[in-house]
Structures are given as C-alpha cells and as structure tokens.
Image (cartoon, rainbow, N blue to C red):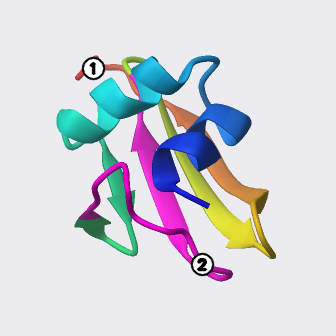
Amino acid sequence: MRLDLFLKISVVKRRTIAQKLLKGQRVLVNGRPAKASYEVKDGDIVEVFLPTKKIILRVVGNGGYEILSEERVSKPF
C-alpha cells in the first residue's frame, strides 16, 4: 500500500492532506523522509508531525497499524 493511502486510512481524512504532509517532509518512515509512492511494509515505523501532534505508528500486516505514541506538541510546526 502506498504511504499516502496508508496515512489517509490511519491519520488524516483526505489523501491531498497526506500528500502535503509528505511534500513538507512532516512524515518519516524508519527515521527518514519518504515519498507518497513509498510502499509501506509490515514493521515500518511511521512518524507523522501534525501542527499540534506527533503520532508514531507501526505498520502491521498489509495496511493495518498500531499507534505506539501520540503526543501534543506545544510549539506548532
């Protein structure tokens, strides 16, 4: 599954928002910035930096996910 679609399923409501986050390098996969076309794999760690939150997810299976951490950030990005 493409990363932008994975983000739409797990974090954001629209794929265009996911693509904007990816273009702004606000999404890391296994500690590195990734492109929308990246194919997520079982075990990947995805960090998403939203304006007021940081969410860390683990990819489980084919498109499933587990939230490892969700924290508010006091300073918006």
Asked if residue 34 is among those painted magenta in the image, a careful observer would answer yes
Residue 69 in picture, x, y percent from top left: 64, 52
Mark 1 or mark 2: whose residue is earlier in sequence: 2
Classified by dominant secondary structure, the portion drawn in magenta counts as loop
Q: Which mark is residue 75?
A: 1
25 and 9: which one is in front?
A: 9
Residue at disc 1, secondary structure: loop
What stretch of residues is rendered in magenta?
33-50
Q: Quadrant of the C terminus?
A: top left
Q: Is residue 38 above or below residue 15?
A: below
61 left or right of 34 in image: right
- For image coordinates 43% across by 20% down, the residue present is 17
Residue 72 in picture, x, y percent from top left: 51, 27
Q: How many marks?
A: 2
Which residue is tagged 2?
41
27 left or right of 72 in image: left
Asked if residue 47 is among those painted magenta in the image, a careful observer would answer yes
Residue 53 in picture, x, y percent from top left: 49, 28
Q: Which mark is residue 7?
A: none
45 left or right of 59 in image: left
Residue at disc 2, secondary structure: loop
Q: Is residue 6 above or below residue 23?
A: below
Residue 43 in picture, x, y percent from top left: 64, 82
- For image coordinates 49% across by 53% down, the residue present is 3
Task: Point out the residue furthest to the left here.
Answer: 24
Q: Is residue 60 above or below residue 54?
A: below
Disc 2 residue type? Lys
How far is the residue under mark 1 from the one under mark 2? Answer: 31 Å
Q: Is residue 71 above or below residue 67?
A: above
Q: Nearer the viewer, mark 1 or mark 2?
A: 2
Disc 1 residue type? Lys
